[in-house]
Image (spheres, rainbow, N blue to C red):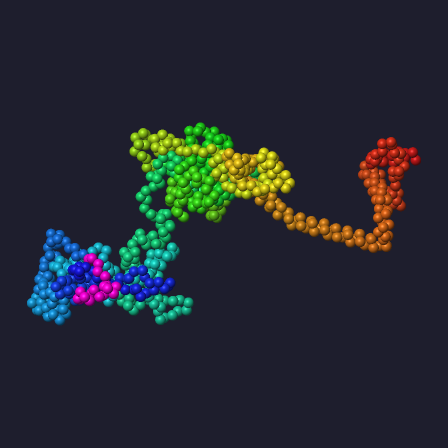
Amino acid sequence: MFLQHDLIEILGGMDLVDEDGRHPPEPVVQGRLKIIWSDHGTGEFVYVDAADPGSYPVVCHRDEALELMDAGRWRIVEGFAPIYPSDTDIPENHRAKRDADWEMIKPIIDRKPDVFVKMLRAKLINSAAELHDTTKITIRKHLLRAFHGGMVANALLPGWDAIGNAGQPRPGKADGPKVGRPVKHGTKSGCNITKDIQRLFLIAADAYERNEGLDLLGAYHLCMRMFFSEVAEEVRAGRTTRVPTAEYEKRGLPRYEQFCYHVRKERGRLASERRRMGERLWALTSRPLLSDSTREAWGPGARYQIDATVLDVYVRSRRDRRRLIGRPTLYVVIDVFSRMIVGFSISFDPPSWQAAMMALANAMSDKVAFCARHGIEIERSEWPCAHMCAILEGDRGEIESAKIDGLAQYVTIENAAAYRADWKGIVESRFRILQKPFGPYVDGYVQSDFRERGARDYRLDAVLDVDDITRIMIGLILYHNNYHEIVSYPKLPEMTADGVPAVPREMWNWGIANVGGRPRSVPEDVLRFKLLPRAEARTRREGIYHHGNFYTCEKGIREGWFVKGGARTLTISYDKRSCDEIYVHDPSEPKGFIVARLTPASRRAGMNGWEVALQIACDREISADRRDEQTMARASAEGDMDAIVDAARTKMREAGPQASLASQVKGLRDAKGEELESDRAQDAAEYRAAIIGEPESGDEESGSATVVDIGAVKKPDRYSTPSMRDILKRDTEKGAER
């Protein structure tokens, strides 16, 4: 039951409890004993502490061990005998040393079980030391090695092969002679690097790894200041003088070379740099590149990558060239297999799901019609990409959105890890290809020296709008797809055999014909409906209201969406690149939507969403600039109104007591007629003064007015109120008669 080389595990820890008051599920191994000999006749066996090479044998009886096992204190596990090389693999000098040491202790080893009893073992050791003219310490050392090494001669093999290995430290005492390479310059002998000093070095190394602004030399000086120096007794005002501690005053401080050696040896250069940079940055910039994404794409359309960047050029508004509106965002979709740029979009939205969807819609739609809308004529063979991909790889913030569920029924979505742009290295490299030509030719291109004194601000040179940038980008993409050769592309042997150049269009066409077949296609209007962003819109009498515009459709007119009281909330999809139409969700329709078009009253035909937003913002700025003036004008008008009312009240009081309400109401009609005749006479006088040149008053000196007798005019059978011209003509004729 208890065999040589088996292990006895000492168990414990069952009396311990965690924070929740629970005991460990299994006992804890607190130590291991190695059985080195057993006597089946007597039931005795001998063990040593497996973890302590200086422990001596202990004799134990089988019954005692069984009691400990029943109590759960011991457990027997199978062990293995030490494995030593054969004599043919052992150097001759090692064999000679082994045999000499084994000859000293073999007579003692053969005296079992006496050798395991302390008193008897001591006598045997004394006899062997006298016989071989050596010390008892030497004999004990050999015996311990034999006990722990399997009671065989090879247990005494010397460990010379482990002495002085490259990379292994040569221990030295702090006050002992200098070990290692001697100091070439200076009078000080140099400092031995002990375990304690190494530990201080590693503390400073931790500071180096945590602080990006601290280099290794700075970490060394920090270490010297913290652990190897002290403030001198001599104190000067405003200054502190540090000197080496007494321990290092004579020998000298640890040198910078020693510090670097031990830090890099202990931590490793790569591990230290990895901890310093952080896992994210290290993986992004320094990890080994042993594979690429092309291996995961079996043919054209198998895998698309999508990503965004802010273009290095400032643009102006299409509606007002004087207005600078910033740098647009470029989204690019690329086929991994062929490196074909299958779609893109340019917008002023920050990188988001909405902007990504517009790029995907472009990737999966007809490019001939798209280029035609921008005044560029192409052949279908120049950009033969209007297909759905099998796998779409993008960023988590854009592609992981719940709003992409409409696309997920057609495409498998994969997301790159956060801050790991290298996972989409193919599309990332396309940005450099597309942006590099901008610099020498495009006004408003971002310059690196514009902040220098005297340099012109490049933003003032901007002349292009988003349509211009789109046309430029189409030209660059056509060049890339049809002519740009990818030097580092890992071509298949079959592609080389067929003479296919590493040009995206050629590889796309070859892949369609030989590898993956034709990718899937989806009707463009259905695709746009699935991909475009969604929103809630409310109907009004003017139409369906969305982002400052109104839309109408035949179904809405027919069902009374726009009549008073017929308002409703609708779910729509919209394209920010064009405000001319929206898609109203309607499950009853075959395609699931109806198209609503912009009403003429909106006055924004041909505009895009960013231009509409810009116009709304400009209108608000105009209103804001006039708000104070408007407020003051209103205040002035109200002040004048108050003054007029106060004056009228004063006149009312001066007019004396009023008649009764009944009498005023009774004569209301007559008073109104008199007032009307008076107003007409006053208007006639003012008109005569303005047109004929006569004074407004008939008697300038007295100031009395001429009363026009309207009642004296003979009314015709079909009476109509005389015009002002008739009245003036009649008065002129009467004056001539006089």
Q: Residue 703, how many percent across, how many down?
A: 87, 45
Image quadrant in which you'd find residue 129: bottom left
Residues shaded magenta: 60-79
Q: Residue 401, how many percent across, how many down?
A: 46, 45
Q: Is residue 362 magenta?
A: no
Instruction: Looking at the picture, tell me which residue is in the foreground, 647 or 317.
Output: 647
Q: Residue at x 75, y 52 (%)?
A: 642
Relative to 677, residue 153 above or below: below
Question: Which quarter of the figure is the N terminus placed in?
Answer: bottom left
Q: Residue 313, how many percent across, how many down?
A: 48, 41
| Side of 91 where 558 appears, left or right | right
Residue 615 visible: no
Relative to 177, residue 685 above or below: above
Q: Is residue 75 magenta?
A: yes
Q: Residue at x 90, y 35 (%)?
A: 734
Q: Residue at x 33, y 39 (%)?
A: 295
